[in-house]
Image (cartoon, helix red, strand yellow):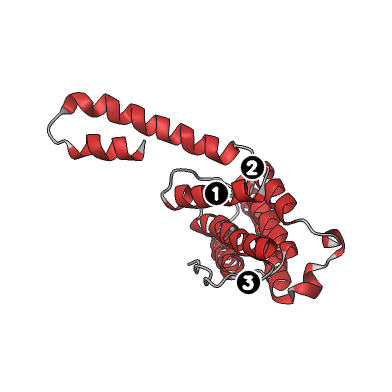
Amino acid sequence: MTWRLKHIEAVQGHSHQTDDIDALWRKRAELARRIVDAAAPTIQELLLKVAMTASLLSEGEVGVVLTPQYMEECARALAQDGDGEQCLRALEPELWALCQRVQEQTAAIEARWDCVEQSEEAGRLDELRDGSSLSMAWAELHESVWSVARYETMTTVGLRAKGKIFSDLLDFFNAMDCLFALQDSYLRDFDYLAYRRLHGRDSPMPRRSVG
């Protein structure tokens, strides 16, 4: 599909091909969505799906990769005895602290948003001050999510924590670049952990940095 698009778009001065190009872009977007939704019952199939969806995400073909089904497949592929009893705070205290900060800042923004709405309804003069405070809180949350995305987790518990942060924030906002980075980080970490799961050792290839 990509090859056909490049071939048609390379032909200049043929306006009658516009409809063909639009149809191919729609078809490509549909195929991208189907790849995200496709079941991947084995870890080998899931690695292929992760590679494809990471590419689609980087190209802007899809906005949300980490659906509940997707994360369930990743958790199942990496599952080991005792995983459910492991504690993120004990295994990766730095990531735990980063996730805690995101959760606390999200709760603070929700409270400040309520204050802004109340100020608007009441017509009070402190509306601008509340709005400025809310803007600063958004900036702080944005940087905190980036910090989670930059963290390279070494455990399946850490991977689940990243997925939970993404799921919690997706209902909160969905147009910030830090969420795209967080998805990319999750996929990168899964690939690393899957290699260790399959081969019993760390991958010789360094993880691609995010941000």
Answer with the quarter of the image where residue 191 lies.
Answer: bottom right
- Quadrant occupied by the N terminus: top left
Is disc 2 placed on a helix, strand or loop?
loop
Within 10 angstroms of label 3, few (less than 14), some, or many (20 or more) residues? some
Q: Name which residue lies at 78% across and 68% down.
A: 88
Q: Tell me which numbered mark, 2 or 3, is placed earlier along the sequence.
A: 2
| Mark 2 in CB contact with mark 3 (< 8 angstroms) | no
Depth order, front residue of 180/201: 201
Q: What residue type is labelled 3?
A: Asp
The single residue placed furthest to the left in the displayed view is 13
Q: Distance between the residues labelled 3 and 1?
A: 19 Å
Which residue does the image show at 46% across and 47% down from the upper left? 56
On screen, residue 12 versus residue 3, left or right, reads left
The local crowd at label 1, few if under 14, some if 14 to 19, many if 20 or more residues have their Cα within 10 Å, is few
Labels 2 and 1: the sequence-earlier one: 2
Residue designated by label 3: 202
- Look at label 2 and name its amino acid: Ala
Res 136 quadrant in image: bottom right
- Circle 2 residue: 40
Neighbor class of circle 2 (other Cα within 10 Å; few <14, some 14-19, many 20+) is: many
Q: Residue at x 83, y 66 (%)?
A: 86
| Number of callouts | 3
Q: Where is residue 19 in the image (x, y as percent from the top left)?
A: 28, 24
How far apart in space, not on screen, are marks 2 and 3 (Cα)? 23 Å
Name the residue type under label 1. Leu
Do residues under tags 2 and 1 come within 8 Å of each other at their CB atoms?
yes
Name the residue beneath numbered marker 1.
Answer: 48
- Whether residue 204 can be seen here: yes
Percent across and percent down for residue 49 are: 56, 46
Q: How far apart are labels 2 and 1 at the CA level? A: 9 Å
Q: Earlier in the sequence, mark 3 or mark 1?
A: 1
Which percent across, then down, holds residue 181? 52, 59
